[in-house]
Amino acid sequence: MNSERPNVEDRPRRLKRFVFGTTTGSLSTFLERRGVYVALAIVVLISALLSPAFYKFSNILNVLRAAAVLGIVSIGQTIVILGGGIDLSVGAVMGTVAIFISEFTGGSDDYVAIAIPGCLLIGVIVGWLNGLLTTKRNIPPFVATLGMLIFVEGVRFAYTRGVISGRPAPFVRVLASIIGPIPIPVVIMAISAVLIGIMLKKTPFGRQLYAVGGNRETARFSGINVERVTIITYVLCGLFAAVAGLLLSGYIGYGDRYLGRGFDLDSIAAVVVGGTSFAGGRGGIGGTIAGVLLLTALFNIVLILNLQVHYQLILKGIVMIGAVMVYSMQMQLKE
């Protein structure tokens, strides 16, 4: 008979298992996989109780259209963060694309066949440069993309000198419009989410991306080209930011130098709230879309209640802090 006394240091861990379940981190797993959906359901319910106008069809359409633009840029941000990076230049790309399409087309479809690929190329180039800075020059992603944000905005201001003229082509405005009961941007977001979700879960690149985000050195020793994977993530992020910029310009209906501002932090918030780890290697597109809807619903109820806009900033801060607290609790429960 084994007469050894149990290790006293194991008691807190045994107590944690007793309270939260015998399976490893059962509550942690629930929070990780379903927490954002529970929060979304609670916010929608509270919004309906605070203001019945939340469920008006016109308001729901506005929420979906706003969520679609943020959702598209957040899909790209998810890819980068899964790889262990971050992209602060997405807002600058969106604003530059919005101005470019307005200036180049001048409200006409004559040059739209050239302008749209040009806008997408802007996003790809900025993403490629971000990838090169973080891989070839070993610049931290935060610093590299912040510098790119400043550079892109500087180039844009030098080109326009602060004076914006023109309107996006009618074709672009159609892309941001509503056909029947469904906004086209929502369809684009849904298709993008499905395709990227399949890429992440079912393709070798997706598995490599999770491996790189989980541990770059281990991934490198496993034969994965870490630099190539990282550059591709930033290129895809820039591409999605460009698409979001096109839709935003079509939705607003004119070029403005302030378009795109705030989407950098909002997209990061949506990704983190959706359960993707800042450290990389864990998360997915489904959670990000739920995070986008959660943030958009919160911002919408602020407007419905006629509260001042700065309450949106307060909500962003609360949501971000709450997401980090939940993430920390998950890590503690897994110990």
Image (cartoon, rainbow, N blue to C red):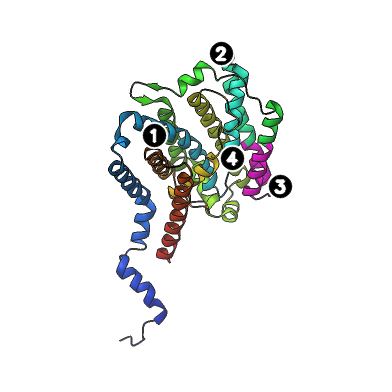
Amino acid of disc 1: Val
| Residue 108: numbered disc | 2
Query: Disc 2 to disc 4, how far (Cα)?
Result: 31 Å
Q: Secondary structure at mark 1?
A: helix
Residue 156: image quadrant is: top right
Q: Position of residue 300 (x, y in %)?
A: 40, 38
Q: Secondary structure at mark 4?
A: helix
Q: Secondary structure at mark 3?
A: loop
Can you say which quadrant of the picture contains the N terminus? bottom left
Q: Dot 3, how many residues are within 10 Å of its Cα: few (below 14), some (14-19), or many (20+)?
A: few
Amino acid of disc 2: Ser
Q: Position of residue 283 (x, y in %)?
A: 45, 48
Residue at the disc numbered 4: 234
Along the polypeptide, which appears first: circle 3 or circle 2?
2
Q: Residue at x 70, y 32 (%)?
A: 155
Residue at the disc numbered 3: 137
Along the polypeptide, which appears first: circle 3 or circle 4?
3
Circles 3, 4 touching at the beta carbon (< 8 Å): no
Residue at the disc numbered 1: 63
Query: Disc 1 to disc 3, how far (Cα)?
Result: 41 Å
Q: Nearer the viewer, mark 1 or mark 3?
A: 1
**Number of marks present in the image shown:** 4
Q: Position of residue 193 (x, y in %)?
A: 43, 36
Along the polypeptide, which appears first: circle 1 or circle 3?
1
Q: Position of residue 286 (x, y in %)?
A: 40, 42
Residue 253 part of the magenta-drawn span: no
Q: Dot 2, how many residues are within 10 Å of its Cα: few (below 14), some (14-19), or many (20+)?
A: some
Query: Disc 3 to disc 4, how far (Cα)?
Result: 15 Å
Residue range highlighted in magenta: 127-151
